[in-house]
Image (cartoon, grey):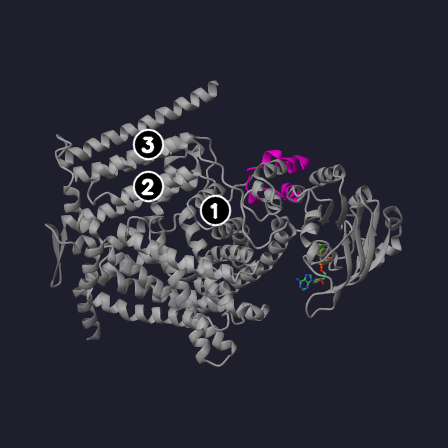
Amino acid sequence: MHAHPFDPYVPTASPVHALDPRIKLALVLSFLLGVALTPHGAWAALILFFASLMAAVVLSGISPWRILRRSLIGLPFALAAFPLLFTTAGAEWFSFHAGSWTITATGEGLRRFLSIALKSWISVQAALLLSAATPFPDLLLALRAFRVPQLLVSVIGLMWRYLFVLADEAIRLMRARDARSGIEPGRRPGGGVIWRARVAGGMAGSLFVRGFDRADRVYAAMLARGYDGETRALPAPPVAPVQYAVLAAGCVWLALLILIGILVH
Amino acid sequence: MHHTIDVEHLSFRYPNRPAVLDDISFHIEAGERIALVGPNGAGKSTLMLHLNGILRAESGVIRLCGMELGDATLRAVRRAVGLVFQNPDDQLFSPTVFDDVAFGPIYQGCSPEEIRNRVRNALAAVHMETYIHRVSHHLSVGEKKRIAIATVLSMNPEILVLDEPTAGLDPQARRNFIRLLAELNQTMLVATHDLAFVKETCARTIILDSGRLAADGPTGKILADGNLLARHGLLSD
Amino acid sequence: MLLHDLKSVWMRHRPLWMGFGLTGVWLATTAMHIPDGFLSLVVALIFWALAILAIGYALSRVRGELKERQVPMMGILAAVIFAGQMLNFSVAGGTSGHLLGAALAAILIGPWPAVLIMTCVVSVQALIFQDGGLLALGANLFNMAVVGVFVAWGIYRLIRKITPDTRWSKLLAGFLAAWASIEIASLVAAIQLALSGTSPANVAIPAMAGIHAIIGLGEGLITIGALAFLMAVRPGLLDDKSAPGESRLVWIGGLAAAILLAVLSPLASAHPDGLEWVAEQTGFLDAAQGPAYEIIPDYVLPGISNEAAATILAGVVGVGIVLAAAWLVTRIRKSSAAG
Ligand SMILES: Nc1ncnc2c1ncn2[C@@H]1O[C@H](COP(=O)(O)OP(=O)(O)OP(=O)(O)O)[C@@H](O)[C@H]1O
Ligand SMILES: [Mg+2]
């Protein structure tokens, strides 16, 4: 069995994997909500959120390094909040002169900036854990439980099924392009940017053509098995009471953390 | 029971194209296994799409299990005929093996309990019970082909129509697959380029070329006729 | 002389330029998927509501005109767009252009199904690739699946209306639609960040607009390439996608939204106080946190009122929690190995 490099799921047996996907999604969303509700600068609470998440990661048997490494991809976005350092009103932290300008960084600004970066980082890790510990078909079940319309869930399911097929096709197309566009060392790649963009566009176009053709064939395959335009699915199995208990305990814990954030702040 | 296939004077063309099927007629008895051979582009896949009402004949009549194919009988025909497509990636369109095998029964309106039973039985029939929760895109071609058969077996079809079932299989998988087909007892029409497979599995062979029925008879006789095979591009040298 | 002027301008605004540069780096790397943590909860929820309304309406439209084959079609086109986003081409200096796809989707299958397709693409990106946050998903859906699609559709229809029906008209319309969908969607993202008090409007909006004016060129060029290819092999795909009669409101609406945002954003960035005022009003979590939280008496946790002490304590407790989890795991492993 080859795992696709795209598929973030890490198949291990763990209490986290065993959790019902609906409960898992609910817990992750509550976690994100909890982090969002924690005031800026409530470091104690943020540390506890982070620790709780790491505990869940350890429980899941997934390497914490994997989660930590992947969580760094979102870091550049933190620059968006960087100007806050200088634009937030507050007590001066340091200032410097640039020509006739005096730039003042404030402690309040630093606090805001760090809080946003930290919250974002913790949130990304929660999402990473969810996708690493939940097979995608289970996430579809969770989406249905969260009242996402069946039509959208069906489209997402189909999309996910053919994502890998088409991504492989895209990779093959790019490989074919690169194989034929070797350049001598020290020379600039031939053709202008416009030409290169059009080549990429042509590849996108051919993906679309293949996609339309495949859609016809898949539609025929669905018709052959009785598809009538209605999207249907088996009723979801009930959630076990134990699972609800886990959800309740998790929510109480998260509420406690939010409270700590507010009180200590 | 009469799980028969009757095709009378069937003709078909894709829009703005020359005729792909030209006045085809044949009759298949219940329980027969028939091979449909012919060069690329002969119209085999097109013919098979007619047997499930996905393509509609331009002229001619198709009768499956005695029902004449038409709007009124479409659902019943699709229930009775299991059509397995040439490319398993087209056939397996659901995220998991379970979802795919359950698709037909769900649209037949079975109860959840019945659906689970049917999925289990269909997977057992192709010896893939342990794959029930696997994700389709991680399967090998041979595994996909087996599951593709299970997706129609779960609908309890009386007739199986298979488009190139052995293409792309390695020798071992092909052998297992032939054994598997021998275990199934439905009426079977199999399009294929694999003459060794035909010799082993099907008692009767139909040759289709350029949309016309070129020959129809016992497999032994047809495969022995070198001239006939050469004329229809079925010999490699 | 000119050089000297330039230098003095540079020196005077150096920090500002540096800010732009840094923001640019971020924009170039993450396009416009806003992660969690960058939107205030209120802004996130408002845009969730707006996105759900728009997508819900698109759903009812698609269901109404649903030809049976549209479900597999939408599923596979969503996968195509997802895969298409992997097709990049080098622009300069290690950066590369790639595709968002809202415009192509709208042109090829019409605006309502395109909204649903982009909804699926953006949601799956957030759900399994962490491209954009989950709380922020509403805002990202609004920008890319709603605004991106309708702006593209509006511009495309407008250009097709006012130019003769030729190959060039389609290509030009496609290019401008793609460019505008990126530009306008990025403006909305900038406004969301400013509304959240995360990025000052006078930095976020010009930086976003500037960078995405360039990123949009890449989108436009790829779109042209794709349309040219499709015209050559499947001209039928580019036939008019609007249902007769109904579509005028839709594309004019998209166009109006595009123009409104194009005019409003520079205004907002020139007068950041306006947005900041709104940010403070909506961002009650920041502004009203104090009073709201004062309801809870602060003597509940005696002894850790000192923030530094509390933080250290949290660190210790945190390490304890993780260690406890590790201990639990080894115990589970042992017992399952034994049993
Ligand atoms: N959707 C379509 N639209 C137009 N022409 C088609 C379509 N599908 C098939 N054809 C044409 O119809 C003819 C018969 O195709 P068909 O797929 O039935 O052949 P086949 O016998 O199954 O070939 P192969 O052995 O390669 O699978 C071919 O010439 C093909 O180009
Ligand atoms: Mg064929």
Label of residue A6 in the image = 1
Q: Position of residue B221 (x, y in %)?
A: 89, 48
| Secondary structure of the residue carrying numbered label 2 | helix
Tally of numbered discs: 3
Q: Position of residue C236 (x, y in %)?
A: 58, 70
Count residues near mark 2 (Cα–Cα under 10 Å), then give few for <14, some for 14-19, many for 20+. some
Does label 2 point to a residue whose CB lies under 8 Å from ligand 1?
A: no
Q: Amino acid at mark 3?
A: Ala
Q: CA distance from mark 1 to mark 2?
A: 26 Å
Relative to C247, A114 lies left or right: left
Depicted C269 relative to depicted A226: above or below: below
Q: Nearer the viewer, mark 3 or mark 1?
A: 3
The quarter of the displayed image where residue C251 is located: bottom left
Whether callout 3 and callout 1 share a subunit is answered yes
Which chain does the numbered disc 1 sit on?
A: A
> In this figure, which residue is indicated by the disc labeled 3?
A249
| Highlighted magenta segment, given as a residue range | B120-148
Whether callout 1 and callout 2 share a subunit is answered yes
Mark 3 vs mark 1: which is more N-terminal? 1
Count residues near mark 3 (Cα–Cα under 10 Å), then give few for <14, some for 14-19, many for 20+. few
Question: Residue pushed farthest left?
Answer: A91
Depicted C168 relative to depicted C206: above or below: below
Q: Are marks 1 and 2 in contact (CB under 8 Å)?
A: no
Q: CA distance from mark 2 to mark 3?
A: 12 Å
Which residue appears at 50% of the width and 72% of the height?
C244
> In this figure, which residue is indicated by the disc labeled 2?
A30
